[in-house]
Amino acid sequence: MEENTERPKTNVTITPDQHVFRGETVTLRCDIDGEAVTSWKYSWYKDGSVSVFSELQEHTFWYVTESDAGNYSCYGAEREGSRTSNISDAVTLTVSDKAKTVLSVSSQKWLTEGDPVTLICEVKGSSTGWTFSWYTETVSSDYRSHHYKLLSDSSRGAGGNYTVSSAALNHTGVYVCRATRGKPAYSTWYSNTQLIWVTGVSPPVSLIVSPSRTQHFTSVSLSLSCEDQSNSDRWRVRRYSDSLGLFDCSSRWGSQTGSTCTISYTVPPYTGVYWCQSESGEISHPVNITVHPGVILESPVHPVTEGDTLTLRCLYQHSTPPNLRADFYKDGSLIQNQTTEMIISTVSKSHEGFYYCKHPERGESLKSWISVTASSRSDGLNPMIIGVTAGLTVTSLIIVLLVLLWYYRNNKVRKSLIFLMFFSANVAGQCNFKAPAQVGTGKKIDHLKRFDCTRWKRSQKSIAVVQSRDDKSLDEELCIIFS
């Protein structure tokens, strides 16, 4: 019987991948399909050379470099016999410089609370065997250095996609990713930064911009203040731009006193997204601020509520007054021409979009995104709710009047006039004055002490301020707050 002289096939595999990066650990493995042979002697060849550079079944480059790139093949011979294998097909090993990761977002990067968002991390030029980690960029307490903080749930995005199914205010931040593979572990550079900003219904703090608009001229001053109910100074103003990265307000571009950041001289690189943030991670609505010479669009800093009025103006830095008669555009389409201001009396969700203005001689402004939020007001209130609310209001009024009578009689204020003023603080922080009721007699009051409603802007409470004044000075002041 004639002996089978067919040579067994030989295969080369490269781990972790045929495309690797400088510094990775790479293993070449030679496998021979010779079932009857228990021991092979291996020979490795590179780029068609007849010189053997290794006789191991697995050859490892512990720190691969560009010089190790090439076409590899192997061959086997039986140690205690005469059989030999075919020479394998050549397999190409490509070695690139340090691996780079690229971070992108599945949707727009400005979100409303509850929106889903997915961050996508990829290794440029490679897709095999990577495990991904996720970080946010932070600034040191002295504002001089930056570092990356691993997300507590980073493992959710190990496959390359980090998904937030319902975005919250505290998801606002600057994100980066990194990939790792192999043993020992090889890590890529950190990715590009990616800002995600989220607007919500009731942030713990508001960023107040003065002048109150999102676009600003160059060479002017700009004030950014973080205001909360307690007038706390625990807030820092932060700015992010794709070109300059993440910075707190500091001597580099501004000065912060308490919770107010002042920029004394604006320049175009100060364009970016600004927000307030505490050490514990609480965050305000982010505001996209642009600095631009020439023509700018005057538009609201914060989202507009459905049903409110929206007013846009086109301003020019080098004219007095600065208002221009210009054309106004939304999402690239002309919506109003040759007017000094564009007014939308009742805003709806359909008015959300990118706006800009254009003057035939002075040029055009940058684009500003105007966001519209749902109104908290209800058009069809339940009659029972209305009745209960009215009853509580009358009861509260009676209690206040009783307190006033007690206050009036026990303090025996003479020649005085007592006014009862009711305010309701709305979401925008404005005080709605309701008709005063005179409950005392005396000389006419020449002025009343101003009451600042801003600290009650989200309390939705009514405020009764009782003031009595004689001819010379303010005697007493009583402030009662009730729901």
Image: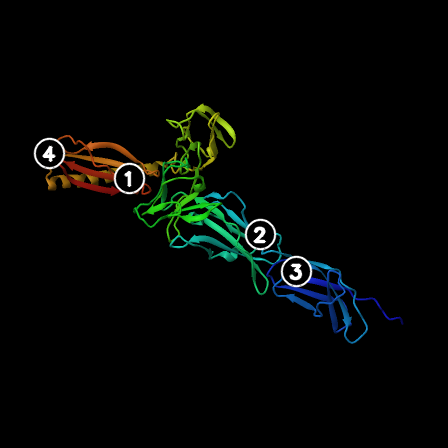
Task: Specify the quadrant that holds the N terminus.
Answer: bottom right
Which sits earlier in the primary sequence, circle 2 or circle 3?
A: 3
Quote the CA–CA distance across marks 2 and 3.
26 Å
Residue kind at label 1, given as amino acid type: Cys
Q: Which residue lies under the disc numbered 1? A: 453
Q: Is residue 471 left or right of residue 47?
A: left
User: Who is closer to the viewer here, 309 or 176?
Assistant: 176
User: Who is closer to the viewer here, 361 or 77?
Assistant: 361
Q: Residue furthest bottom?
A: 80
Q: Given this view, does label 3 or label 4 mark the residue nearer the observer? A: 3
Q: Residue 268 at what x, y percent from top left?
A: 44, 39
Quote the CA–CA distance across marks 1 and 2.
50 Å
Quote the CA–CA distance across marks 4 and 1.
29 Å
Q: Which residue lies under the disc numbered 3? A: 67
Q: Residue 339 at what x, y percent from top left?
A: 43, 24
Q: Residues within 10 Å of mark 1 (few under 14, many from 20)?
A: some
Residue kind at label 4, given as amino acid type: Lys
Q: Which residue lies under the disc numbered 4? A: 415
Task: Specify the quadrant that holds the C terminus.
Answer: top left
Residue kind at label 3, given as amino acid type: Ser
